Image (cartoon, helix red, strand yellow):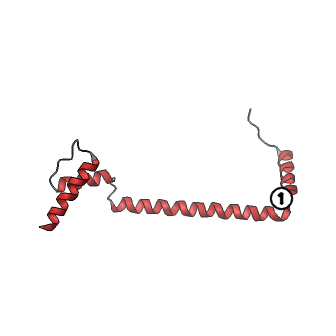
């Protein structure tokens, strides 16, 4: 069975916290915990936003899909090729086309 604390248990726990940490430190700890939570959510939001912007710039495609499109643009059939090998061939052909 799950333990769910009743009002008496909560009062006892709060009393123990006041005895251990003192009435002055508990609000400071709660404030620090709230700020930490806010900073965490702010950082999470920034990371999500950066990933979304990157996805939008790529047109919603994965890096492998972008590589396949680049390969088709330079005339390579990407079927059955390793990603590293395909990347080398595409880069070489794109450099060759840029020189011309």
Residue 74 picture location, percent across and down = 16, 56
Which element carries disc 1, helix, strand or loop? helix
Does residue 13 appear to the left or right of 36 in the view shown? right
Q: Residue beneath label 1, please?
A: 21
Q: From what the image shows, is residue 88 above or below residue 24? A: above
Q: Quadrant of the C terminus?
A: bottom left
Residue positioned 21% across, 47% down in the render:
78
Residue 98 picture location, percent across and down = 16, 66
Residue 16 picture location, percent across and down = 86, 52
Residue positioned 85% across, 55% down in the render:
20
Q: Which quarter of the figure has residue 5?
A: top right
Does residue 50 appear to the left or right of 36 in the view shown? left
Give the farthest residue toward the bottom: 99
Return the residue nearer the eye: 100 or 24.
100
Q: Few, some or many C-alpha atoms within 10 Å of disc 1 (few <14, some 14-19, many ≥20)?
A: few
Q: Quadrant of the N terminus?
A: top right
């Amino acid at each position: 069975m799950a333990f769910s604390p009743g009002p008496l248990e909560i009062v006892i726990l709060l009393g123990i916290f006041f005895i251990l940490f003192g009435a002055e430190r508990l609000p400071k700890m709660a404030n620090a915990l709230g700020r930490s939570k806010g900073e965490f959510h702010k950082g999470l939001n920034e990371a999500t936003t950066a990933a979304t912007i990157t996805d939008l710039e790529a047109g919603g495609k994965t890096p492998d899909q972008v590589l396949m499109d680049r390969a088709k643009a330079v005339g390579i059939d990407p079927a059955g090729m390793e990603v590293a090998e395909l990347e080398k061939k595409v880069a070489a052909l794109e450099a060759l086309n840029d020189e011309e």
